[in-house]
Image (cartoon, rainbow, N blue to C red):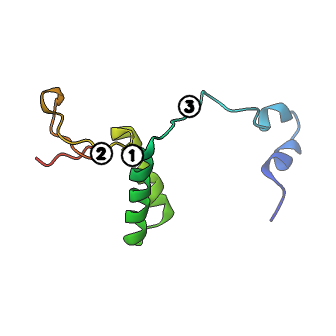
Amino acid sequence: AGKPVAAVQADKPGVDMGKLIPHGVQGAQSKIDLNDEQTANAKAIIAATKKAGLPERAAVISIATSLQESKLENLGHLGDANDHDSLGLFQQRPS
């Protein structure tokens, strides 16, 4: 299997080990607390990807897309508050 990359790099003269080893998390992290509807929608996405025989990664991508587009809320037409005709978890346009 060979030496780990850091060990191989450490064999080179002038290498600063402190720069090779990651220290902490880069950037801020956030989280979202899902309500019952959002949790049910995430479970429905997982069930649909399993039923379609898709890999787990498909469910991850689908949930990430829905989080971005609708915060996992199944949005219908919003009437006068709607600035376009996007609908559903993925904000798809029927037009």
Q: Indicate whether 68 appears above or below 48.
A: above
* Spot occupied by residue 17 in the image (x, y as percentages of width and height): 85, 35
Residue 91 is left or right of residue 3, and the answer is left
Please name the residue shown 89% across and 45% down the image. 11
Residue under label 2: 74
> Of residues 20 and 93, which is closer to you in this image?
93
The amino acid pointed to by label 1 is: Glu
* Spot occupied by residue 62 in the image (x, y as percentages of width and height): 40, 53
Q: Indicate whether 52 appears above or below 92.
A: below
> Of residues 20 and 56, which is closer to you in this image?
56
Q: Secondary structure at mark 1?
A: helix
Is mark 1 in CB contact (under 8 Å) with mark 2? yes
Residue 80 is left or right of residue 14, and the answer is left
Q: Earlier in the sequence, mark 2 or mark 3?
A: 3
The answer to which image quadrant residue 54 occupies is bottom left
Residue under label 1: 37
The amino acid pointed to by label 2 is: Asn
The amino acid pointed to by label 3 is: Ser
Residue under label 3: 30
Q: Secondary structure at mark 2?
A: loop
Q: Secondary structure at mark 3?
A: loop
Residue 41 is left or right of residue 83, and the answer is right
* Mark 2 Cα shell of 10 Å, populated few (<14), some (14-19), many (≥20): some
Residue 64 visible in rendering: no
Please name the residue shown 13% across and 32% down the image. 79
Q: Indicate whether 88 appears above or below 25.
A: below
* Spot occupied by residue 65 in the image (x, y as percentages of width and height): 38, 46
* Mark 1 Cα shell of 10 Å, populated few (<14), some (14-19), many (≥20): few
> Of residues 26 and 58, which is closer to you in this image?
58
Q: Earlier in the sequence, mark 3 or mark 1?
A: 3
